[in-house]
Amino acid sequence: MSSSKLYRGRLAPSPTGYLHLGHARTFWTAQERAIANKGTLVLRNEDLDASRCKPEFVKAMFEDLHWFGFKWQEGPDIGGSFRPYNQSERFALYRGALEKLKAGNFIYPCMCSRKDIQAAVRAPHAADDDEPLYPGTCRSNLKSDIANLKFSWRFRVADGETILFQDANLGPQQFVAGKDFGDFVVWRPDNVSAYQLACAVDDHEMQISEIVRGEDLLKSTARQILLYRAFGWDVPKFFHCSLVTDESGVRLAKRHDALSLRTLRANGANPDQLRHAWSFANQS
């Protein structure tokens, strides 16, 4: 784990829709932990997906976060020592990291589409994760084998390796490579960094000491630990929050417009009362 004495946390929203109460509770935990540790809170705009990230969502993101009571010390709107804080402006860093993975033979070119991968995986695995378990179809590919073809770059995991980490909220965690998750994409066919690589690079470059996010990203943490190791970087600490659900027990998503911060704000909701409800729920 990182030996840095300076606490640095982050908020990392993606402007592909309006933020909802689930985001707010996780982000509030991140802010509270930064305050408790007398640290710095960074806002990073994860706007890599140009087709889904819209200017109106970026504008709403800042407005809704400020309305709810968030205060960050570094970010796209105020700058800081680790700028730029928009992922869309950090392409050179991701490309440099990709070249290091190539040089270390950690990755290989893959021509499989998401549909191809899902078709090659047995059903029990396909629905268990945000990325289907990859069967290794292209593991023996060389770049020279697929010249002039469209492909992604995929990180090769060591099948059977157990990735262990201590979560500050959920306790000890372990995932087995090749069973719980497989080889994963780090660079997309449209020449854009995938989430796993961009997130690991940014958290390292911005010297984030603790990553606070939802428990749905536990497997992503295992993947990113492998990237940290490949680069020879210190691994930060982790705090994964329980997810907020609707009345039916379904995890909140950006399609839950009634619980978006934008809608709650328009309807006159009080952020203090919303946060009090969380505290009451946590005590019950």
Image (cartoon, rainbow, N blue to C red):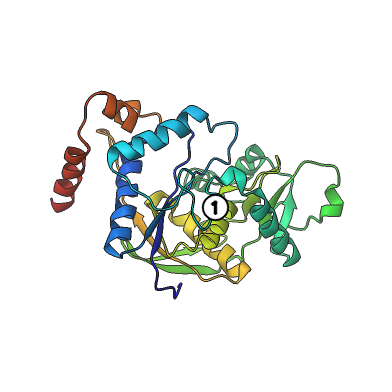
Name the residue at 32% across, 53% down.
Answer: 31
Q: Is residue 102 left or right of residue 163?
A: right
Please provide percent x and percent y for residue 273. 16, 38
Whole-percent x, y for residue 224 in the image: 53, 60
Compared with 128, 269 (above or below) is above
> Where residue 58 appears, x then y in whole percent?
47, 34
Where does the N terminus fall, quadrant-wise? bottom left
Q: Residues within 10 Å of mark 1 (few under 14, many from 20)?
A: some
Q: How many marks?
A: 1
Residue 12 appears left or right of 119: left
Residue at 40% in and 29% down: 255
Write down the residue under mark 1. Answer: 83
- Is residue 138 something one can see in this rendering? no
Give the camera-side residue of 169 and 45.
Answer: 45
Q: Nearer the viewer, residue 104 or 276?
A: 276
Above or below, 47 against 41 in this view is above
156, 91: nearer the viewer: 91
Q: Is residue 158 visible?
A: yes
Classify 1 as above or below 15. below
Q: Is residue 177 above or below residue 128?
A: below
Residue lying furthest top: 267
Residue found 48% across the figure and 40% down from its top: 14
* Residue visible at 48% across and 58% down in the picture: 221
Kindly identify the amino acid type of the residue bearing the numbered disc 1.
Answer: Arg
Give the residue furthest to the bottom. Answer: 3
Q: Position of residue 95 (x, y in %)?
A: 69, 53
In the drawing, does residue 254 fall left or right of residue 244? Answer: right
Could you say whether the residue bearing mark 1 is in a helix, strand or loop?
loop
Using the image as rendered, state which of residue 99 and residue 218 is in the foreground: 99
